[in-house]
Structures are given as structure tokens and as C-alpha cells.
Image (cartoon, rainbow, N blue to C red):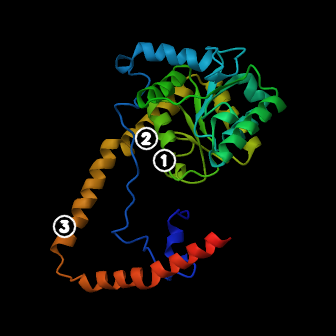
Amino acid sequence: DSVGQYESYNCFTMPDLYHVVNGIELFSPKFNVVPPGVNESVYFPYTRIKDRVQGDRDRLNELLFTLEDPEQVFGRLDDPQKRPLFSMARLDRIKNMTGLAELFGKSPELQEKCNLILVAGKLRVEETEDYEEAEEIKKLYTIIEQYNLHGKIRWLGVRLSKSLSGEIYRVIADGQGIFVQPALFEAFGLTILEAMITGIPTFGTQFGGPLEIIQDGVNGFYINPTNHQETAQKILDFLSKCEHTPNYWYEISTRGIDRVYSTYTWNIHTNKLLTLAKTYGFWNYSSKENREDMLRYIEALLYLIYKPRAKALLAEHAKR
């Protein structure tokens, strides 16, 4: 009931090179998407205490909420016991971490109820050679000053190993936190799966892959990250319901875990991929169709048309 991200491949054009008037048939049985899965040995529910390393848990708890280390952390929390509003992503424009900080800054009610915890790339402009990341770093500092978020935000400039990235979600879940994925567009949303399977109620962008993962209001929530007021209100409504119905956080947490285990684990991904590969591999093997003529035709297009035109375009581009 909605336009998928592969619809555009139906009419595909490479200017002056190649034009397809009728491309992928979306309803063909050979057109299958196998969604990624999470590794259950790294990302698992916070309630599985026996599988967690206490040393890592303590170290990450300190890093997230109290450690004073200007090399790794910006910001000191006035009240580390507030519910954590957590996000983890690269600092680039499309991931929109600065948009989440601005949303938080515009909502005194959110600031009263939560601390904003960001695990987002580097802390200093001089540490990056990426222009876009440098601009986002500057913008984040500007937002912190503009909305006076000192004491309410922690910004971690760290890169975590796989095992620690799984545990950091679980530490957030220990504090009954929430995960927000504020991207302007997300092709799939692996961090959403990671947060949900560890037990964190998750708010994900409505633009892209999260529409397929989250069932809104059942095991997570859609947000429009371009509408700050609406998004903040949706988070506040959830927090209000948690206050009035103490089991509500656990209900959403449990449903999120069940959703990932039923559809998006690494085991499900590999089994489906191998099954489809065997199915279509069988038909290729058993088919008597001679594809030699088609392969020669494709090679002719590549060497006689595509490569000369690509070379000409490259030369034209080099002169600009």
C-alpha cells in the first residue's frame, strides 16, 4: 500500500549511455529482497544477565553517564538518573543527529524528563578530514549553546567494538531508555534492529526501511524527523503513558524483541538467502535455454557503446 524504494528502477536511465523503458518487474517471483539480520550472539535482550560481561556493563555505564574525559566525552549531566534518550550514528547530514539535538533543545518538557545521549563520531573539527562531518560537528556545538543544553546532553566521540556496541544498547535498556533514529532517509535501519532486539523501545524515521521493520504503536513508533514538534510530542506521549502505566515500557520492549526474533535475525537472513539461491540456481542449471547469444550481445553493448561513451564523458568532466 506504499511506493517501495525499488519502484524507480522500472524506468532507469544513464544519460547518453543507456535507457531502460521497462526494467524490474516488481511482482516477478524472481524479484526477492532478503533483509539483513542481527547477530544474536552480539545483540541480545538486556534481560539475559548471565550472557553479559559485568566489567563491560560497569565501564559503559560510567562512560555513558558520569565519566569526565574530554578526549572521549563532551558534556556533564546534572541528573544522570533521568531516563536516557539515546541515538548512535555517523555525524553526517542524512543521519540527522543535529536535528535530534535541535528537537531536544526546542522541547523543555523533553529536557525535564530525559537526558540526551549521543554516540556520534568525533568531538573536534580538526580530527576529521570529511567536510560534511566537520560542518555537523560545528552545528552540534552551536545547537548546544543556542538551547543551553549543558547538563542535559552527553556526546560521546568513541568507536566501539562489536561486543561493546551490543552492550551499550543493553545499558540504555537497564535505565528504561528509548532509542531514536532521526535520519532524513534510511535505506534499511540496522541500528533499529540492534536497539529493538536488546529491548529498547524504538522511534524510527518514517522515510525508508524502518517502515518495513516497525509496526507503528505495536512494537515501535514512526517519526517524521523534519517535524520537530510532532516528533517531540510523540516521544512525550510515550513517556506519559509509561508514567501512568508502568508496564507499558516493558510491553513495547518485549514486542520489539519478538519482532526481530521472528523476522530479522542473522539465522533467518542466511537461511532465506541460501534457500532462494538454491531455488534459482536449480532453474539455471536445469534450463535448456542457450544464453550464449545474449551474453555476446551484452558484451557488444559494453565494448562498442558503453565504454567509448563513458571514456568521452570522463574526458569532458576532466576539462571542467
Specify whether 66 is left or right of 151.
Answer: left
Circle 1: element type: helix
Q: Earlier in the sequence, mark 2 or mark 1?
A: 1
User: Is residue 147 in view?
Assistant: no
Q: Amino acid at mark 2?
A: Arg
Hey, which residue is sitting farthest right in the picture? 146
- Number of numbered callouts drawn: 3
Which labelled disc corresponds to residue 213? 1
Q: Position of residue 118 (x, y in %)?
A: 63, 30
Q: Residue at x 16, y 81 (%)?
A: 288
Q: Earlier in the sequence, mark 3 or mark 2?
A: 2
Q: Residue at x 48, y 81 (%)?
A: 308
Alpha-carbon neighbours of circle 1 within 10 Å: few (<14), some, or many (≥20)? many
Which labelled disc corresponds to residue 282? 3
Asked whether the residues under the numbered discs 2 and 1 touch, taking CB atoms below 8 Å apart as contact, a structural biologist would say yes
User: Looking at the rendering, which quadrant does residue 182 occupy?
Assistant: top right
Residue that carries the numbered disc 2 in the rendered image: 259
User: Looking at the rendering, which quadrant does residue 30 occupy?
Assistant: bottom left
Image height of 262 relative to 292, above or below: above
Specify whether 267 is left or right of 208.
Answer: left
Hey, which residue is sitting farthest front in the picture? 319
Asked whether the residues under the numbered discs 3 and 2 touch, taking CB atoms below 8 Å apart as contact, a structural biologist would say no
Q: Quadrant of the C terminus?
A: bottom right
Q: How far is disc 1 from disc 3 in space, using C-alphas?
A: 31 Å
Specify whether 232 is left or right of 94.
Answer: right
Q: Position of residue 137 (x, y in %)?
A: 70, 37
Q: Position of residue 302 (x, y in %)?
A: 40, 79
Q: Amino acid at mark 3?
A: Phe
From the image, state whether disc 1 or disc 3 is nearer to you.
Answer: 3
Q: Earlier in the sequence, mark 1 or mark 3?
A: 1
